[in-house]
Image (cartoon, rainbow, N blue to C red):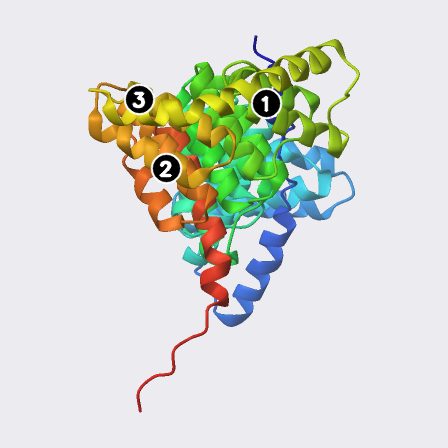
Amino acid sequence: MRFLSHFSMGIALATAGALTVTAFPAEVQAQKKKKQKKQKPPKVSKEFSAQAGPVQKAIEGEDLASAKPMVESLVAQPWTGYDKFVAGQFAVNLGGKLKDTSLQELGLGAMVDSGFTPAEQLGQFNFYLGNFAYGAGRWADAQQKFQTAFDLGYRSNNIGALMAEAFFKENKFQQGLSALDAAIAAASATNGRASEDWYLRGAGIAMKSNVPALAAEWTYKLAEAYPTGKNWRAALSVYRDSAKLDDQQNLELMRLMRKADAMESERDYFEYADAAGPRKLPGEVVSVLEEGIAKGSVRGNTAYTKETLSLARGAISADKASLPASERDAARSANGKIALATADAYLAYADYQKAATMYQTAVSKGGIDTARAQMGVGIAQAGQGNWDAAKQAFSGVTGTRKSVADFWNLWIAQQAAPAAAAAPVAPSAS
């Protein structure tokens, strides 16, 4: 029985709304005026000047609407160089007065294509063009313009997130996540770390892509950047629901969820208890359900809670009594199967030292799933706070368990980091 979390849907919908920002080409005009004060611009051609005069008067007149076709006609002509740049300025200026974004876009396009846009403004201009395209639903055009602006060093107005969204609109998940990853890297380099919403969005899209490796990658990023209990729960829930873990792997993940203070709903506790099994690991089932009841997350009077606790409590005495004999049998056995089962039992009772020893015995004897035993070694070492030994064990896990082991190693790094930061610095030799 699996108690699937509803959290995944919340993550998938996180920041799902359009991220469009309003472009203000008036800023372009203001910056151009500052530029013109510093250096004299090149002159337009006589041919352009002759046609532009009436257009300028129309723009300065009271009937702005009548000036629009004149400006559109002027921009449409095959001007080059500075003539084209100034024609674009006419369109931007009139478009701003009319609040006509299509005219503003036409003008900015001409200015960029003219080759006369100052290098320091090319990124900004391309961002505006990308934003216009985004607002109009021209996703491919938006992608190209945003990418150009980003490559030119433009970082304002959430450009990286907008570029990613332009890819997501066309279900180009890989490209969008790559763009979002680049945006996160750039923001982190400048500000220390990117917005939490960007990580949430990446995790949701990665899950939507139905590629488990992507879901693991992005939920890992979320927990790495913002290691709160809430985000650990988000990360592990999204990964769990997309990776299709078996009961043992799910138990290994749920143990981490508990360690990371990410157990929240009754559903979490029920799934943990179900994965452990009231007859298989009764001590752990009792421990986790009693913890949930104490926190107010689990109702003690439900049929599931009462039945599961009754079964588990009834099995504990005999289970504990069997452990010494199991330990002796494990030592005599030709393979590690008995040692593995005995280690599981000790781990369930939080006897981490004996559990680690028995898991290592199971590995040395062989004949078992080595990755499963290595996970056990890592969890048992983590339970004792032996971070280096735990990390070494988890780092040796391969196959389908590797992502779960990577999550454990991330959590270990976060536990070890505060201790390292608090350690006294040795005085330097003088």
As measured in the structure, the alpha-carbon distance from the residue carrying label 1 to the one carrying label 3 is 25 Å
Task: Please say whether residue 224 is visible from this viewpoint.
Answer: yes
Q: Are marks 3 and 2 in contact (CB under 8 Å)?
A: no
**Vertical order, 296 against 30 (above or below):** above
* Label 3 sits on residue: 329
- Regarding mark 2 in the picture, which secondary structure is present there? helix
Q: Nearer the viewer, mark 3 or mark 2?
A: 3
Q: Position of residue 380 (x, y in %)?
A: 42, 38
- Residue 360, by quadrant, is top left
Kindly identify the residue that appears in the image at 38 percent across and 23 percent down: 325
Tell me if mark 1 has few (under 14), some (14-19) or many (20+) residues whose alpha carbon lies within 10 angstroms of its own. many
* Label 1 sits on residue: 285
Quadrant where the image shows the C terminus? bottom left
Numbered marks: total: 3
Q: Is residue 274 left or right of residue 410?
A: right
Quadrant where the image shows the N terminus? top right
Q: Is residue 62 left or right of residue 246?
A: right
Q: Position of residue 8 (x, y in %)?
A: 59, 22
Give the label on residue 356, or none: 2
Q: Nearer the viewer, residue 87 or 61?
A: 87
